[in-house]
Image (cartoon, helix red, strand yellow):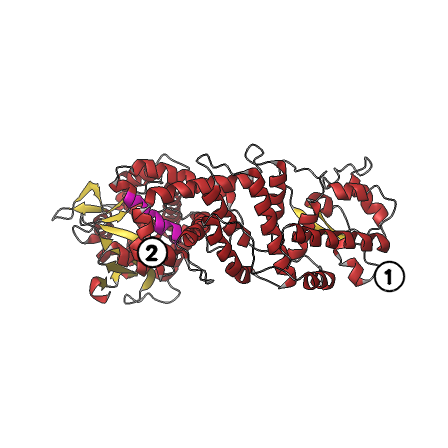
Amino acid sequence: MSHNLSVEQKNILKLFEERNTRFLIPDYQRPYAWDNDECLTLWEDITSFAFPEDDFNQDDEYFLGPIVIFKNDKGKLEVIDGQQRLITILLILRAFYEVMKDYDNDDWCREVRKSIGKCIWETNEQGEPYTALLKLETEVATDDDRKILIKILREGTTDDNSSRYSKNYKLFQVQINDFINENINLPEFCKKFTSLPFRLLNNCILLPIEAGNQNTALRIFSTLNDRGKSLSDSDIFKVQLYKAFSADGKKDWFIERWKKLEALCEKIFTSLTHNITPMDELFNRYMHYERATQNIKSETKPGLRAFYSRENYKLLRIDYELVFSNLIMLAEFWYSVYIQDEERFSERVLKRLFVLKYAPNAAWTLITSVYFIHNSDSQGALEEEKFYNFLGKITAFVWASTIVKKATMHNLLGPIYKEMINIVSNQEVTFANNKFDMDELTDALRRYKFSGKTKITRSMLAWWMMSFREQTLWEITPKLETEHIHKMDRNITLENYNSLGNQTLLEEKVRNSLSSTQDFSVKRSYYSGIASVRKPGTQIFEIQEISRKSSFNVKDINQRNKKILDSFIAFIEQNNLTK
């Protein structure tokens, strides 16, 4: 790759001023994302560098970071990484250029302003700008505000108050004017004033890494940690889909639907870790369907980019229409799960999906995605009875594996991958090689410590709550917290206190009204929501029933605990998961 690579440290002036240097933010990139806080931080960093406490050394340099580019077939430098910094730097320079026209009678100001102009526009041999020819263009398809950026760079003005371009440009104007007001009375004001943009142009350094082609540039990007908003895996995949649909004359069609798909995923996948985006999660769930159709039995889960980039992104280049159609259909399915769509699912299916939301890990989402894509009809509908039974079997297997075998997400992938292949082969999900010994299951349940707020404790309580036929779904699911029904005192052992028999899930609002030191006689009034409390009670059917009791003692705890565990064992047997 080295012979295809050019790396040369450049100051901002040298980077931009070269004639015929035109940067392009391509249409597959994300919109500009820096806000005032990030811009203010950059401004403060630059001013602190330009005016240190001791004297400024003209050989000092301030490193702004790398940018990754490649020259496209039109001779423009497409920016793969570094968009945020490049645009922000040009907004700063344009703000200086506009303010400095009021000081054009000063030689220092006139010279620096001319240098700034060379960074913003194409110029003639005398350095005079062609203001219609910007050094940086943006074609970001999902950026509704890009026309505002063009106007700012061309004219130096904006009437808009909502776009990030306008907000950041106005921020820099304010900072420059504040700097002027603080120094206007100095004897050599113009010299100090021009020192700031001069040092920005000549002493602030970027490291352009120019690759020979787009694929090389993307590989380089993946190894760098950009200070700005980096491209996600799904952004890289969008590049391939975008090119495929564009070649098919469906560029605008694809862009419109990609934007809708992104918005939908933002609603669905709201609790992800910082290093995976909602669209990444959609691609992750879909990946397991493709793995299954390719009969991949490996228990090692590949990285998203490693999987989709195989054979130069063959899946996204060749089967792009089918893949994109499946992605949209899959997202719509998960959205229906998220909103508890009663038109799409029966109540009993929704109850099982509700329970699975409290699963101890996300393995169920992968196999359910495979099941849906393979078994749904052209309208995205599933056969209700089979889907209901499938969800029951997945719940039973994941819950029992976690309790008996202390299984984690990683441990579950092996048997689940095998069942994914069974699904796409039109076979039933049986977990035939992973069934549970009845004695081992019973013993593990009896000895398991369902204490604290562990995931499996919440999982078991959610399953038990929805096992009651009378339990209804509520329109908007409240956040549920673990609640101990009987308080900890000398009449109860720690084992009884932390048993499933003494625990329940409870709506956060109801739970927050309670104290762990309150007697059951007090708690029951909050459970039922009696008038004197003036707060709504719980919607959990079993707890409503318990609140009608005059007392809840150790005997009640033990009886309830036995009932929960016996019912769960019966649930495992009903799903044919015992040897």
Residues drawn in magenta: 228-244
For label 2, the crowd category at 10 Å Cα-Cα, with few meaning under 14, some 14 to 19 and many 20 or more, is some
Q: Secondary structure at mark 2?
A: loop
Q: Is residue 41 left or right of residue 345?
A: left
Q: Is residue 578 left or right of residue 129?
A: right
- Specify the label residue 260 is tagged with: none
- Residue 62 image point, x, y percent: 33, 63
Whether residue 396 appears in this view of the structure is yes
Whether residue 96 appears in this view of the structure is no
Nearer the observer, 81 or 414? 414
Compute the Cα span from label 2 to label 1: 62 Å
- Specify the label residue 309 is tagged with: 2
Q: Is residue 351 magenta?
A: no
Which amino acid type is shown beneath numbered disc 1? Arg
- Residue 247 image point, x, y percent: 25, 42
- Specify the label residue 490 is tagged with: 1
- Residue 550 image point, x, y percent: 88, 45
Nearer the observer, 429 or 34? 429
